[in-house]
Image: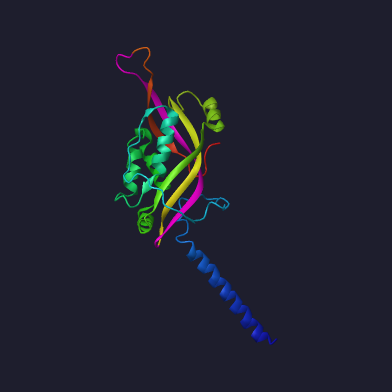
């Protein structure tokens, strides 16, 4: 075969292959419904990481207050759910959902915690893109535990270095995003792991009975980077 003809054929095959790849990328809709927060070291893709056609699962339309009463583990779960549960069709924005967590954050860590929360939520620009696809997000929790690294930190800390009642919980679960690509419902899933740092203060009524349980009032301190939790 003439060398020039061979080169033309090679270029044509490459162009066709490139076009097919592009069509495949377009065919899966908005990649991950505008991918959520990414770590500096992306995790290996899994079979659950791509979009699948399914009926979107409804989540609360409005930002919901985080309940600060109860035990520390219950509060950690409430923080996690508030952090990952949002709906771009609700008429609210990322700042409104972030405010729910700001309302239960310790004053001493307000600035740092606000920065942590913003890193988990879409920016205003990404939110606007997600809204065009009616995107909702929710979290299912698989495990929650006090990491060994926290126990080590407490054992090595000098008095006063760690606030009274402070504890850390590492949470692992799955983030779900649902929305529409055109008229087709789409769902993407992504495994997540993170650590919630919080503090709880035991409280009792002014005239408690012996049978009345002590209730903890908890506040958020900080959050780890997404997918970079304490272990």
Residue at screen point 44% across, 51% down: 177
For this orientation, the residue located farthest to the bottom is: 2
The part of the chain drawn in magenta is 182-208
- Front residue of 66 and 159: 66
Image quadrant assignment for residue 96 = top left
Residue at 36 percent across and 31 percent down: it is: 68
Residue in the foreground of this view, choosing between 139 and 107: 139
Q: Is residue 86 above or below residue 25?
A: above
User: From the viewer's perspective, is residue 199 above or below residue 42?
Assistant: above
Where residue 30 sits, quadrant-wise, is bottom left
Q: Quadrant of the N terminus?
A: bottom right
Which of the image's four quarters has the C terminus? top right
User: Does the segment drawn in magenta span residue 8?
Assistant: no
Residue at point 41%, 29% (across, down): 199
The answer to whether residue 23 is above or below residue 124 is below
- Count of number-bearing discs: 0
In the rendered view, would you say 107 is above or below 28? above
Q: Is the magenta stretch mostly helix, strand or loop?
A: strand
Residue 69 coordinates in the image, percent (x, y): 36, 28
Q: Is residue 71 left or right of residue 8?
A: left
Expressed as whole percent of the image width and height from the top left, the position of residue 92 reads: 30, 49
Nearest the viewer among 3 and 50 is 50
**Outermost residue to the front:** 55
Which x, y percent locates residue 200? Answer: 40, 27
Residue 79 lies, in percent from the top left, at 40, 37
């Amino acid at each position: 075969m003439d060398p020039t003809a061979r080169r033309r054929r090679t270029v044509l095959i490459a162009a066709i292959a490139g076009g097919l790849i592009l069509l495949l990328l377009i065919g899966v809709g908005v990649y991950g419904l505008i991918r959520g927060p990414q770590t500096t070291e992306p995790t290996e893709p899994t079979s659950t990481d791509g979009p699948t056609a399914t009926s979107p699962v409804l989540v609360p339309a409005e930002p919901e207050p985080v309940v600060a009463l109860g035990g520390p583990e219950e509060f950690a779960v409430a923080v996690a759910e508030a952090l990952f549960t949002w709906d771009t069709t609700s008429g609210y924005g990322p700042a409104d959902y972030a405010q729910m967590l700001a309302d239960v954050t310790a004053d001493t860590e307000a600035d740092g915690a606000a920065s942590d929360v913003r890193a988990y939520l879409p920016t205003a620009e990404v939110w606007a893109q997600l809204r065009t696809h009616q995107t909702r997000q929710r979290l299912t929790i698989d495990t929650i535990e006090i990491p060994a690294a926290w126990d080590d930190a407490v054992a090595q800390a000098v008095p006063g270095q760690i606030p009274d009642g402070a504890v850390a919980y590492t949470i692992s679960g799955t983030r779900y995003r649902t929305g529409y690509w055109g008229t087709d419902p789409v769902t993407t899933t992504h495994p997540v792991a993170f650590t919630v740092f919080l503090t709880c203060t035991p409280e009792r009524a002014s005239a408690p009975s012996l049978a009345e349980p002590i209730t903890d009032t908890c506040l958020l301190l900080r959050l780890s980077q997404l997918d970079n939790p304490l272990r």
